[in-house]
Image: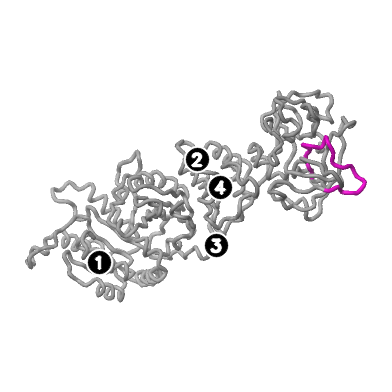
Amino acid sequence: MGSESWQVRVGAGSVGSGFLVTDRHVMTCAHVVAGAERAEVTFAQYPDLGSFTASVIVGGDWHGEVRGDVAVLELERPVNVTPARFAAVDAPYAHPLAKLTAYGFPQDYDEGILGEFRSASDQLIAGEWVQLESWTDHGQPLEEGFSGAAVVREDTGEVVGMVTAKHERGGGGRMLPSRVLVRHWPGAAGLVPVRDHSPEAVARLRDLVQGCVDDRAPEAVYRSVMGPLAPLPPVGAGFLSLWDVAWFLLTEVTPAPGTAPWADFAAHLADRTQDPAVRSALYQWAGDHRSGTAPQGPGNRPVPGDGGAKWSPILVEIERSGADHDAYLVSVYAIRGGRSQLVASNTLAKGRVREYVSERLDHAFRQIDRSGDELIAFALPRDWLGEPVDEWHTSAEDPTPLGCSHPVVVMDLGRRRQSRLQFMLDKAWQTLERSSGTAWHRVECGSAQDPTRLTVRLSKQATAVGYGAPPETDQARGLLLAGLNAAVPVMVWQRSICSGRHGGDATAERSCVGARFLDALQERLTSLSPADLPGYVRELRREAYEAEEPEPHWAAGLALVWEDPRWFPEANVYSQSPVS
């Protein structure tokens, strides 16, 4: 059947045109049915079908606004007529020059008449419409009765827009292209093809977004996702709704290689919805619609070769936010193919961070490469390095310590953002991979070493450092900083606090908590490759958790700073203001 089959005449006080888009829905202009609750619809090419009564479900309350002249009618019953077929949202209709047709019902043409037109340009005027001109000087002009007519590419029979107005001279008028129609009626989202996304995926996102409520303006949500230098939103009224933001990202934004702004948007909404089912579905949609493995580029690093486990990392970045003195920007990434994929990001009070991370880790697991071993890395502010993140609950339903369920390591966020130290870490791992085990440098409990001298000493050798005391004093924190500044890739300590005062008694010094820890460290871990340490430390944490001896297990409270930058993209792959 030709396009005439789905062209309809619409009567609701005034007369206009329209076109069938589903077996029960007709699109037309809002000014054709303005103020009406019902309209009469007839199929000009099928008089035997008779007339249909249709309810005005969109556009009946239109009052002559400059924008949004779109109405949708719902027929009283389905009709056995093939609906119109839309062209892809980015299909050309102006270049190369294409003949466009429209089927209208001007006065004295109850059966309708066909007009031929062309688009002067595909540029939107006032962010909404494009200009139509007569194909020939003597052809049928646009006039009353053409409002609501589908504009069709003659060569393909596909709809590219809808007539909304005629010009006083020249026989042309205005057309709302299909991408604008979907802005005003999200119900058409699954009908207009979008590059790289199936109709089902677009319709699913629409349904999920419409289930979200955000008290911020849509443009503020857009800026939170895309940053201050994002492409400009539609001119005029700006974004109409959260769905309008999603549609703009799907159809108007050209993403940088390896990025997926529509997925970031879905994850952003998921973080802010109160409905657990909608939140989970949005995370799932985001994970399913991210870019695949990206080519090597500025945001990527080559992954290590042989000599260690193949990790599938999840990165949790926690940094201070300018929003409040107790506010932290928490971002969860899945690392796949050497590139970060943002799973979730939000600004939170410190007391909410643990619960937030626990809930989002499950969504990150959906996106990592299942051929590797999971690795959860926390990139933390320096004053958080002693935070027992490995003892956080695995999930709300599972109180098992996270470090017993999965390999968990800690990284210094500040060091991750210093290119000089990242370069040094890369070099250190190249040396470590050639060694058969792990060489340990001991920093004894109560050590009075000068931190700067320790930095110089450690920077001359590729080694791991074991600390006999946690960074709870100024001296201990200075010695930990020495290891960070020397680009030491592996640093370990026990969170149990030792006084560090042994009165010069050699026996007491060797029996203190820190000394016993360092002895066990060298005994158990020296033969292991540094690349394997996260997995082995998980086994030690399990061993310590299950231990029933009167004295605490030597590995109880074991903290592991482990940073191999080759597994992690450079920091700040996604720009986002911590204040947002």
Q: CA distance from mark 2 to mark 1?
A: 45 Å
SS for tag 1?
helix
Which amino acid does the dot numbered 1 rest on? Gly
> Considering the numbered disc 2 on the image, is that residue within a helix, a strand or a loop?
loop
| Numbered tag placed on residue 187 in the rendering | none
- The numbered mark, 2 or 3, whose residue comes first in the sequence reads 2
- Under mark 2, the amino acid is Asp
Name the N-terminal-most of marks 2 and 1.
2
Query: Can you tell which of label 3 and label 4 is closer to the viewer?
Result: 4
| Crowd band around label 1 with a 10 angstrom C-alpha radius: few (<14), some (14–19), many (20+) | some
Contact (CB < 8 A) between labels 3 and 4?
Answer: no
Provide residue 471's location: percent of width, then percent of height.
Answer: 23, 60
Q: Is residue 131 above or below residue 381?
A: above
Tell me if 243 is positioned left or right of 359 in this view. right
Q: Main secondary structure of the magenta part?
A: loop
Tell me, yes or no, if residue 27 can be seen here: no
Local crowd size for mark 2, using a 10 Å CA cut-off: few (<14), some (14–19), many (≥20): few
Q: Nearer the viewer, mark 2 or mark 1?
A: 2
Q: Quadrant of residue 167?
A: top right
Report the residue marked by disc 4.
219
Residue, disc 3:
295
Dividing the image into 4 quarters, which one contains the N terminus?
Answer: top right
Residue designated by label 1? 478
For numbered disc 4, what is the local secondary structure?
helix
Name the secondary structure under disc 3.
loop
Labels 3 & 1 near each other (Cβ < 8 A): no
Q: Which residues are magenta?
A: 133-152
